[in-house]
Amino acid sequence: MVTPDQIKQRMEVVGNDGLHVGVIDRVEAGEIKLAKDDSPDGLHHFLPLANVEYVDDRVHLNRSSIRAMAEWR
């Protein structure tokens, strides 16, 4: 299980297809907050921490980049 302390600010987030989803702003209330300066619409987006499969030098999601972007809020 991934813990919030494994995820650091400015880490890249990628889908299980290896494609870019965003960049970490921070983790808050069990969600990943993505940086708005890397967002296509200039807004913060949120993904549940439960969507993280594993963390190495990047945050890897358990879903495709397209699905992640369709589901973010």
Image (cartoon, rainbow, N blue to C red):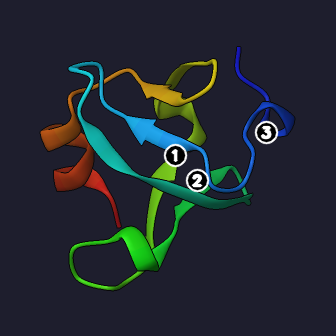
* Residue linked to disc 3: 4
Task: First in sequence, mark 3 or 1: give its number.
Answer: 3
Task: First in sequence, mark 1 or 2: give its number.
Answer: 2
Seen at 21% across and 73% down, the residue is 40
Q: Depth-wise, is mark 1 or mark 2 nearer the camera? A: 2
Sort mark 2 into few (<14), some (14-19) or many (20+) by Cα contacts within 10 Å.
Answer: many
* Alpha-carbon span between mark 3 and mark 2: 9 Å
Q: Is residue 47 left or right of residue 54?
A: left
Secondary-structure class at tag 1 = strand
Q: Depth-wise, is mark 3 or mark 1 nearer the camera? A: 3
* Alpha-carbon span between mark 3 and mark 1: 11 Å
Sort mark 3 into few (<14), some (14-19) or many (20+) by Cα contacts within 10 Å.
Answer: some
- Viewer-closest of 21 and 49: 21
List x then y, in percent, for residue 60.
Answer: 46, 25
Secondary-structure class at tag 2 = strand
Type of amino acid under label 2: Ile
